[in-house]
Image: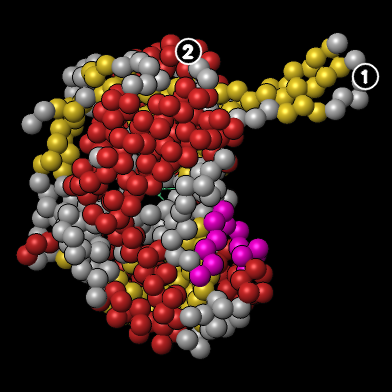
Amino acid sequence: MDVGKMYMGGEWVEAVHGDTWKVYNPATGDLVGEVAFGDGDDAKRAIDAAAQAFPGWSSATARERAKYLLKLHDLVRAHRDELAELVSLEMGKPLREAKGEVLGAADNFLWYAEEAKRVYGETIPSSVPNKRILVMRQPVGVVAAITPWNFPVNMVARKVAPALASGCTVILKPAESTPLSAIRLFELIAEAGFPPGVANLVLGKPDSIGEAFINSEKVRKIAFTGSTRVGKLLMEGAAKTVKRISLELGGHAPTVVFADADLDAAVAGVFESKYRASGQQCICTNRLFVHEDVHDAFVEKLKARVAAAKVGDGRDKSVEIGPLVNERAVEKVMRHIDDARSKGASVVHGGSRLTEGEYAKGFFVAPTILTNVQANMLVCQEETFGPVLPVLTFSDEEEVVRMANDTPYGLAAYIFTQNLSRAMRVAEALEYGIVGVNDGEVTQTQAPFGGMKESGIGREGGHYAMDEFLEVKFVSLGL
Ligand code: NAD
C-alpha cells in the first residue's frame, strides 16, 4: 500500500519527521490506507509555500483564476464516482449521499469560478469637491483551512473554492480520519495546473498544526469547520496576530411539526435531516417538537419510515444509513440513549448498538426514536451527532419557539406547517442562521450557510463566502 503524501509548493512530500497514520473503514474495520502524518514543522513549510505564491496568484486576473477553477470543476465531475467511493470507504457514508456531496463540491468550484469575476469595488460621492472616494476589495492573504471528517470533499471545496477565487492562497488541514479523499482532491488540483504553492495540503497532528497556523504572521485568515470547543481555541489563538476568522461549529437543530403540517412531507423532511450521514451533520435535527394533537400519528408514520431504512456498509447501494465514524462516536451516542432511558424516555425504535453479523466489526447504532423526552436529558443539551431522534411535545407556538431557542447553538432549525403566516412568524423568531420551512435538506451552493450564537461566525456559500476572504480598502484620491 502506497503511503499518501502531503502537497506543498507544487510537490508531493512526506512528513518532515517521517511519521505516518493508518486509515480504517468504519463499516468493516479494514485498513484502507496509510498517509503521511506531519506536525507544525510541516505546516510551516506549507505556509512558506503559500506565502511565496500569494503575490503572483493575487495579482492574476479573475479570468485566469476562474480558468483553473473551471478545470478543477470538470475534473471533480469526471471523477465523481471514484471520489464518492473514497468518501464512503473512509467515513462510511452511503454512496448516494457521497455522490451528492462530490457533485456539491464540483458545484462550488464552478460557482466560485464565476464569482471570482464579480469582486466589485465602489465609488462613493465625496463631501469635499477635490476628493474622490474609491473602495476596492482585495484578498486577505494566506488562508489556513481546517475541515472535519463528515463531509471530507465538500467541506474542503466550500473553503478552498472561494479562497482561491478571491485571490488568496490556501493551506488545507483535513481531519485525521478522512485524508484519502483530500489527497485525491489535491491530485485533481495538481492536474488542473494551479501554480505551485497556491493550494497546499498538510496532514497530521491537529494541535501542533493549529499552533503553527495561529502563531504565523503570514497566515492572515483561518477558516474552520468543526466542534465548538476547537473553534473557540482557534478564535482565542487568532487574537494573537488579529487574524480574520470564520467558524462553522456545532449545532443542536430543533425541528417543529405543527398540527397543520402535511405529516407525510414532514416525515420525509425529518428523516432526511436526522438520518443523513447517520446523524453526523451539524445541521441534523437534534430535538423534534411535535404538536400534541398529531404526536401519535406522526410518530407512527416516522417509525414506519425509519424501520424501512437499511443500515450497513455505505458502499452497498441499498444502504440508507451507514456506520458512525469511530468507537468514541458510538460511546457518545449510547451514553445519550442510556441517559434518556434512565430519565424516563421510551424507545419507540432502535435504541441499541448493532453488533451481529455484518455489523460485528463496524461502528453501527440502530436508528433510534425516543419519546417522552424531557429537557433535562443529555439529548436535549449536547449535540448527539448520531442517528438518535428525541421527540418532545408542545401545545402552542410561543412555547415551542421558546423551547427551540433554548440552547447556546444557532445553526439550523426546521419547521413544518401549511400556514404561511405562522411559517413567517416562526422563521423570524428562531435564533438560527438557517431555517428550513417544509424543507429538511437546506444546503445549496449559492445560499448563505452558517450559524448564530455558539454555532459560529461568518458564512459559507454564494457571494457571502467571498466577503470572508476579502479586505475592504478605501482609497482617498485628492485631485
Ligand atoms: P473537531 O473540532 O474535533 O475537528 C475538526 C477539525 O479540527 C479536524 O480537522 C481536526 O483535526 C481539527 N482540530 C482538532 N483539534 C484542533 C486544534 N487544537 N487545532 C487545530 N485544529 C484542530 O470536530 P469533529 O469531531 O471532527 O467534527 C464534528 C464537529 O464539527 C461537530 O461538532 C459538528 O457539528 C461540526 N460541524 C460543523 C459544521 C458546520 O458547517 N457548522 C459542519 C460539519 C461539522
* Residue beneath disc 2: 56
Residue 12 shown left or right of residue 219 in the figure: left
**Callout 2 crowding tier (Cα within 10 Å): few <14, some 14–19, many ≥20:** few
Position in image of residue 473 (x %, y %): 68, 22
In whole angstroms, how far apart are the C-alphas of marks 1 and 2? 37 Å
What residue is rendered at 58% in x and 63% in y? 405
Position in image of residue 323 (x %, y %): 22, 57
Q: Secondary structure at mark 1?
A: loop
Q: How many dots with numbers?
A: 2
* Residue beneath disc 1: 129
Image vertical order of residue 274 relative to residue 261, above or below = above
> Could one spot residue 108 in this view of the protein?
yes
Q: For the residues labelled 1 and 2, say whether their Cβ atoms are less than 8 Å apart.
A: no
> Could one spot residue 454 in this view of the protein?
no
What residue is rendered at 55% in x and 76% in y? 417
Q: Magenta segment, which residues?
A: 426-438
Position in image of residue 448 (x %, y %): 55, 48
What residue is rendered at 87% in x and 24% in y? 126
Image vertical order of residue 180 relative to residue 314, above or below = above
Residue 249 shown left or right of residue 466 in the figure: left
